[in-house]
Amino acid sequence: MASFLKPFFLGFYHAFKRTFTVKHPFEVLQISDRWRGRPILKLDRCIGCGVCVNYCPNKALELVDCEGSKFPKFDAGRCCFCGLCIEHCPRSALAMTTDYNMGAYTKEETIYPPDRFSQPPKPVEGPRVSLNVLDKKRGAAHTGQPSSA
Ligand code: SF4
Ligand code: SF4
């Protein structure tokens, strides 16, 4: 095929192809249990030592006063979900959740003070969509290859 026709062919092909995008929030992507989502703080285990703050490469954690003790505050806008804070906490007071619903309209909403940081994520309602189903029904757009289904 003449090379100048290729973009037209691809445009035409994708105009009639099913979309890969998940219709969030009406559909919920079924993600792996190993997904690194928003960390959670176990208040009863934390001793406010600040090791997590020191290890965080993005300054997403900061020790703040809370009910007479020091606890980390979390900034979801800075976190890169590396897991270093969890790995190095001497009290296993931090853990990953699979929560990826951290969208916010304001900077303030991305801040999790200790009491909010320790709350488990709210369950998201809606039909679950797995990546395999997306691959088959909508085309494996994430691989860059057209689906044969
Ligand atoms: S979460 Fe762990 S590392 Fe961070 S202040 Fe609490 S005990 Fe220390
Ligand atoms: S997961 Fe990484 S970037 Fe996020 S708060 Fe922990 S150490 Fe910081």
Image (cartoon, rainbow, N blue to C red):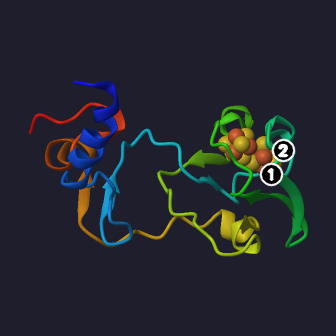
Q: Could you say where residue 146 lies in the image, as x and y percent from the top left?
A: 22, 35
**On screen, 134 above or below 66?**
above
In which quadrant of the rendered image does the N terminus lie? top left
Q: Could you say where residue 7 lies in the image, as x and y percent from the top left?
A: 34, 38
Residue at screen point 76% across, 73% down: 108
Quarter of image, ligand 2: top right
Q: In this view, does 21 lie to the left or right of 35?
A: left
Residue at screen point 79% across, 42% down: 58
**On screen, 24 above or below 87?**
below
**On screen, 146 above or below 101?**
above
Which residue does the numbered mark 1 point to in the structure image? 61
Queried on whether the Cβ of the residue with tag 1 lies below 8 angstroms from ligand 2, the answer reads: yes
Which residue does the numbered mark 2 point to in the structure image? 53
Q: Quadrant of residue 22?
A: bottom left
Queried on whether the Cβ of the residue with tag 2 lies below 8 angstroms from ligand 1, the answer reads: yes
Of residues 59 and 8, which is closer to you in this image? 8
Specify whether residue 91 is in view.
no
Labels 1 and 2 touching (C-beta < 8 A)? yes
Residue at screen point 28% across, 71% down: 126
Going from N to C along the chain, the mark reached first, 1 or 2, is 2
